[in-house]
Amino acid sequence: MKKIPLLLLMIATALSSVAMKRKATHYVEYISGTFSNNEGTIRKVGCVYEFVISTRTDNVMIDSVWFGATPVPCDLLEIKTRHKTDLANVKGLYIVRANKDVYKNFNAQVDSTSSYAAFKAPFVFKGDAVIMYKVNGKRYYVNVMNVTEVKAKGYR
C-alpha cells in the first residue's frame, strides 16, 4: 500500500518534466545554409555564409554568428525583397548573412582582440556555426549543421 503513492508521485514527476520539455520552444529554426570563399583582386573578402532561418515568433533580434572563435556581426535580410532589416518583426523566413573572416581585413589597431577577450563561450562549439539571437532581452542559440559550399558570385 505504501508503494502506490510513491509510484504515483514518480509518474507525476516524469509527466511534468516531459511537459516542461515540450513547453521550451525554439524561437528560430535553421532551414539551410551555404557559404562561398570570395577572393577579390585587391584583398580577400573571406568566407561569406548565408543561412535561411524561420522565426516562430515576432520581434526576434539576430545579432551575431559564432564560428568557433569570436562571434562576428551579421546582416538580417527579408527573404522576398532581400532588404536589410534590424529586427525580424513578424514570424516567417529570413536570411542571415555573415562574413567569417570579417576581422582579417581590419588592421591590428582595430582588430577584435578586445572582443575576443570579453567573449565567454556559453557552451562547447559544435557544428559549422551558431546563430545568436535575442527574444525579449533573453539570449538564445541555434546550431547550424550541413552548410554546403557554392561557387562565389562573379563580377559584373
Image (spheres, helix red, strand yellow):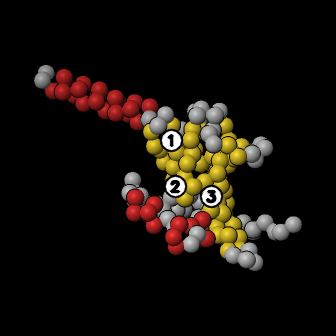
Q: Give the residue number, with chain letter if any, for mark 2.
A: 130
How far apart are the two marked residues, 2 and 1, measured between alpha carbons? 13 Å
Label 3 or label 2, whichever comes before in sequence order: 3
Residue type, numbered disc 1: Lys
Query: Which residue is nearer to you in this view: 18 or 37?
Result: 37
Residue drawn at the location 60% of the way across and 54% of the way down: 74
Residue type at the position of mark 3: Ala
Which one is nearer the viewer's eye here, 10 or 156?
Answer: 156
- Which residue carries the number 1 mark? 134
Residue linked to disc 3:
98
In the displayed structure, 21 sits above or below 123; it is above
Q: Position of residue 138 (x, y in %)?
A: 45, 39
Relative vertical location of residue 14 with respect to residue 63 in this rendering, above or below: above
Task: Specify whether 73 is left or right of 41.
Answer: left
Marks 3 & 2, CB-CB < 8 Å contact: no
- Residue 38: image location, x then y, percent: 71, 70
- Single out the residue that lies furthest toward the right: 156
Whether residue 39 is visible = yes
Q: Quadrant of residue 80?
A: top right
Label 2 with label 1: CB-CB less than 8 Å: no
